[in-house]
Image: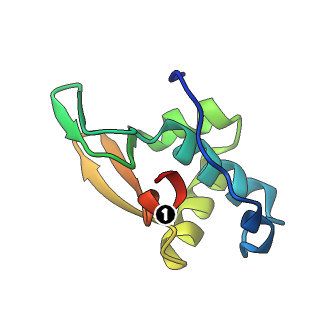
Amino acid sequence: MSQDGWIKLHRSIFNWEWYTNPIVARVFIHILLNAKPEDSMVKMTLVKRGEYMASRRQLSIETGLSGQNVRTAIQKLQATNDITCGPVGLRTIYAVVNYDKYQD
């Protein structure tokens, strides 16, 4: 799970609509921290820059949140176009929209 290095997190996150929602913010930051900084192969699947491949159960375990909390947070992040999701077998690829804006 852990990757070397760091990510940028701009102070403008204070103005982000989900900042005051600790569950949604936690899921988003977790995805951002785990998103690939460059295209790479993960379990024989191409995961592009700004994407993270995981099951919802895996996200639940890694964040310490319930499956329902993770599902609701993902729905909210999708509705506000902060992330997109797509199935890959038993996992999902979570893509941070505007990843380059955050990590350029």
In the displayed structure image, the side of residue 73 where residue 100 appears, left or right? left
In the displayed structure image, the side of residue 63 where residue 92 appears, left or right? left
Q: Nearer the viewer, residue 74 or 7?
A: 7
Above or below for 38 versus 1: below
Give the residue at x 50% y 23%.
Answer: 3
Question: Residue 72 is drawn in which quadrant?
Answer: bottom right
Find residue 50 and report its horizontal and vertical position in percent: 39, 49
Graded by Cα atoms within 10 Å as few (under 14), some (14 to 19) or many (20 or more), the crowding at tag 1 reads few
In the displayed structure image, the side of residue 58 where residue 48 appears, left or right? left
Q: Nearer the viewer, residue 48 or 62?
A: 48
Find residue 14 and report its horizontal and vertical position in percent: 81, 67
Give the residue at x 53% y 46%.
Answer: 31
Give the residue at x 54% y 78%.
Answer: 80
Give the residue at x 25% y 39%.
Answer: 39
Q: Give the color scheme: rainbow, by chain, secondary structure or one colour.
A: rainbow
- Three-letter code for the amino acid on which mark 1 is drawn: Lys
Question: What residue is pinned by disc 1?
Answer: 101
Considering every residue shown, the one lying at the far front of the view is: 104
Find residue 77 and report its horizontal and vertical position in percent: 56, 67
Find residue 104 and report its horizontal and vertical position in percent: 46, 53
Question: Residue 55 is drawn in which quadrant?
Answer: top left
